[in-house]
Amino acid sequence: MNLNLTAFTRYGLNFLGMLGVSVALYFGSSIFIPLTMSALLAALLYPLAAGLHTKLRLPWFFACFSSIMILIVMAGTVTVIAAAAIPQFINRLPSSEEGKDGWKQKYEDVAENLHAMFPTARFQGILPLKANESNVYRSVKELFTPQNVADSIKGIAGVGLRQLTELVLILFIVLFLLLEAELLAKKVRAIFGTSQDTQGRVTAALAAIAESIRTYLYWRTIVNFVLAVVLCLFYKYVCGLEQYLLWGVVTFVFTYVPYIGTLAAGVLPMLEAVIQGQPTTAFGIMLVYACVVTFEGYIIVPWVMGRSMDLNATTVMIACLYWHLVWGIAGLFLAMPLMAILKAVLLHVDGWVPYGDLLSSVDPRPDKNLPSADSTVAIERDRLDNIAERARNNPEATVIMDEPNGHVSDKRVPS
């Protein structure tokens, strides 16, 4: 059935379809987030499981189980380092309000350091030198009352328990996906048809999706680890920060979120330097961190990840905003892998390649069949002149302008 829809109607229907998908993802986040994480981890671990199966002659089940255990050990190591550093940081906080090492003296030292960095009258009005005159100090004091701290610990414990339960569920799903990977791939190919051409296209698209996921997760993890080690050594031996291990773990985890996470990971060690009474060190951290992150983002990452993860900055920011709106914090960490999947799909479907190129930061692939802008204008002008000439020579004809491939035809109006 041909509905003969206009372009505006088609765009409106597409928008409503995208809105419906977004609403479904939002309300089904408790289902889609674990499934998405499981699929990404399964694509990441499949080569490892296959290597254990072929090289070490392990049964397929034990190969899959061993690959998951390796992932658990790696994640557990990072968690233990962070868990050991956080209590040390809390123990170094002042235990009383008065005294040489009390909260008031700590606040006044920080305010004096900040005033030395920003000697303006307006800043002095925002952060007074005396603790008793500062609303910021009173707010922080209220935040760290015993009751609020106890409530915060209870809330964090509850969230941690829920996340641990969800993590166990995700690992079980990953195990099942690895065990049935070949069968599931065949069933997905069968959904799109049985012709050889269709099967080949679907296989190529699935391979490109898996390769994009592995490229991002492998190299992102390696780059994050190297970046965390370099900055950790810099924080310890050059800046003399006490919580250098904690900031290294924060850098490793936060830089999975592009731009936003990278910025947050650099602000925290600067705050510690200011609290320690080292405003010059904080400024040096800002300069060094900016140089390192710029080198990592514009040279290392494009070099090791290649075209598969070549996304322009506008696309990345829009993706982060969208997935954060839909899935919250989890959406920020999943934004880049999901965009890699989307780009791989667009580049392997006929007619969608320009949309895949739209996400990239490089020039679109040249197409000899596409005319230039000047030639397009000339062709369109000749087409309109041809339509007018046909109308003058044949008054009884109705000119159809929306023919495929830009052709113009005329049909007789039935008498």
Image: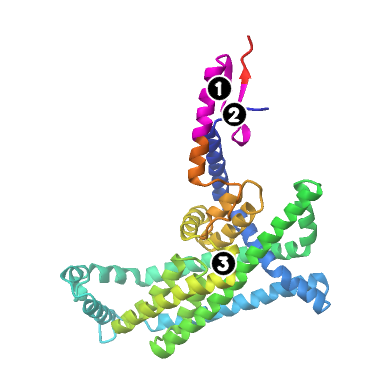
The reply to whether callout 2 and callout 1 are in contact (CB within 8 Å) is: yes
Quadrant hosting residue 34:
bottom right
The x and y percentages for residue 92 are 38, 84
Image height check: is 360 above or below 190? below
Quadrant hosting residue 49:
bottom right
* Residue 321 shows up from this direction: yes
Which corner quadrant holds the N terminus? Answer: top right
Mark 1 surroundings within 10 Å by alpha-carbon count, few (fewer than 14), some (14 through 19), many (20 or more): some
The x and y percentages for residue 156 are 49, 68
Q: Amino acid at mark 3?
A: Leu
The reply to whether callout 3 and callout 2 are in contact (CB within 8 Å) is: no
Identity of the residue drawn at 81% across and 75% down: 54
Q: Amino acid at mark 1?
A: Arg
| Badge nearest the viewer, 2 or 1 | 1
Compute the Cα span from label 3 to label 2. Answer: 66 Å
Question: Which residue lies under the disc numbered 1?
Answer: 390
Mark 2 surroundings within 10 Å by alpha-carbon count, few (fewer than 14), some (14 through 19), many (20 or more): some
First to last magenta residue range:
381-410
Compute the Cα span from label 3 to label 1. Answer: 75 Å
Compute the Cα span from label 2 to label 1. Answer: 10 Å
Where residue 161 is drawn, which disc sits there? Answer: 3
Dot 1 falls on a residue whose secondary structure is helix
